[in-house]
Image (cartoon, helix red, strand yellow):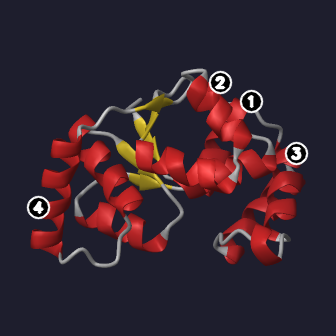
Amino acid sequence: MKVAIKDANVFIDLESMGLLDLWLQLGITTLTSSFVVMELEDGGHENALACIRAKQVVEAEISGEEMAGAFSDFRDNHGGNGLSESDLSVIYLAIREDAMVLSGDRLLRATAEAQHLEVHGTLWIMDRLVGEGVLQPMVAADRLEALIRRTGSEQRYLPRPECVMRISRWRRG
């Protein structure tokens, strides 16, 4: 399995559902950038940060010079198109490491796909967890349902029709 590069929203989704440890059980090497780590620190996402500190998720080294060149090249060739430095760092790492991108951010996903990168999100991860047998379908349904019911500052933005379809399928067994 290719190395997976995660952005903050996937970490947050998995942490919110208590599934980050199950993802790590799949044995897929998972990288992220220092920019994503800073977002997680700013948001107080201690479970995700603990996985990074424990080296279960690798904070990939990117030199300042390397990132400046990558940002400049990307902005020159693509106009920057509203991506944050964190988003650009995820795309840069995925290209450098020949890896898939795990993100739920629409703009990041579209940009990664335009770069011919393999892109997946939280629902794909949940499908993998259920498919690999590390997450029971009923538990997956309960966790996903609780996640999409969040409101206010804890609201998560997943494609509701796809969520409802999975919840229904997992409840049927």
In the figure, 95 relative to 131: above or below? Answer: below
Which class describes the residues within 10 Å of circle 2: few (<14), some (14-19), or many (20+)? few
Q: Which residue is tagged 4? A: 73
Task: Please name the residue shown 57% across and 24% down the image.
Answer: 56
Q: Name the residue under label 2.
A: 25
Q: Earlier in the sequence, mark 2 or mark 1?
A: 2
Q: What element carries label 1?
A: loop
What secondary structure is found at the residue carrying circle 3?
helix
Numbered tag placed on residue 139 in the rendering: 3
Does residue 10 appear in the picture of this structure?
Answer: no
* Left or right: residue 172 compared with residue 71: right
Residue 81 coordinates in the image, percent (x, y) = 28, 78
- CA gap, disc 4 and disc 3: 44 Å
Q: Do the residues labelled 2 and 1 touch (CB within 8 Å)?
A: yes
Which label belongs to residue 134? Answer: 1
How far across and down, in percent of the image, does residue 10 sit?
59, 53
Q: Earlier in the sequence, mark 2 or mark 4?
A: 2
| Quadrant containing the N terminus in the rendered view | top left
Q: Earlier in the sequence, mark 4 or mark 1?
A: 4
At 16% across and 44% down in the image, what residue appears? 65
**Amino acid under disc 3:** Val
Q: How far apart are marks 3 and 2 (CA)?
A: 17 Å
Nearer the camera: disc 4 or disc 3? 4
Q: Return the x and y of residue 4 as percentages of the image width and height.
A: 43, 39
- Coordinates of residue 107 in the picture (x, y in percent): 40, 73
Of the numbered discs 4 and 3, the one sitting upstream in the chain is 4
- Residue 159 vertical position relative to residue 121 in the rendered view, above or below: below
